[in-house]
């Protein structure tokens, strides 16, 4: 891990722990956990953003299909 890191104390289910230990070598487990958390957090961010868009409803700014596709393309390039 090239980035700075913090040690956290939290619990995971026993079955997940067994799978992690069985499937991922000891030196790679933090990377796997970080990657999985990163993906899940991105999904949460996107859901939150979509909820904000929905809450604006009909009173908000309208976007063309082209604008939406361009915005999605730019977002996907980041990942």
Image (cartoon, grey):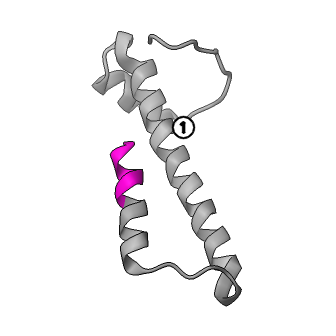
Residue at 42% in and 32% down = 35
Residue 3 on the magenta segment: no
How would you classify the magenta stretch by its main secondary structure?
helix
Residue at 49% in and 37% down = 38
Residue 78 on the magenta segment: yes
Q: Considering depth in this image, is 5 or 70 the residue closer to the camera?
A: 70
| Crowd band around label 1 with a 10 angstrom C-alpha radius: few (<14), some (14–19), many (20+) | few
Q: Considering depth in this image, is 14 or 56 the residue closer to the camera?
A: 56
* Count of residue discs: 1
User: Residue 5's spot in the image, x, y percent?
Assistant: 58, 14
Residue farthest toward the bottom in the current orientation of the protein: 58
Quarter of the image holding residue 44? bottom right
**Which residue carries the number 1 mark?**
13
Residue at 38% in and 53% down = 74
Q: Quick one: quadrant of the C terminus?
A: top left
Q: Is residue 76 left or right of residue 62?
A: left
Q: Quick one: quadrant of the N terminus?
A: top left
Q: What stretch is highlighted in magenta?
A: 73-79
At numbered mark 1, what does the secondary structure look like: helix, strand or loop? Answer: loop
Q: Is residue 57 left or right of residue 75?
A: right
User: Residue 71's spot in the image, x, y percent?
Assistant: 43, 61
Residue at 37% in and 63% down = 70
From this view, report whether residue 31 is shown above or below residue 50.
above
User: Residue 62's spot in the image, x, y percent?
Assistant: 56, 82
């Amino acid at each position: 891990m090239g980035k700075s890191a913090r040690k956290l104390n939290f619990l995971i289910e026993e079955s997940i722990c067994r799978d992690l230990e069985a499937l991922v070598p000891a030196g790679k487990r933090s990377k796997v956990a970080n990657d999985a958390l990163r993906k899940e957090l991105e999904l949460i961010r996107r859901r939150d953003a979509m909820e904000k868009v929905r809450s604006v409803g009909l009173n908000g700014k309208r976007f063309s299909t082209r604008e939406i596709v361009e915005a999605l393309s730019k977002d996907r390039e980041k990942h």
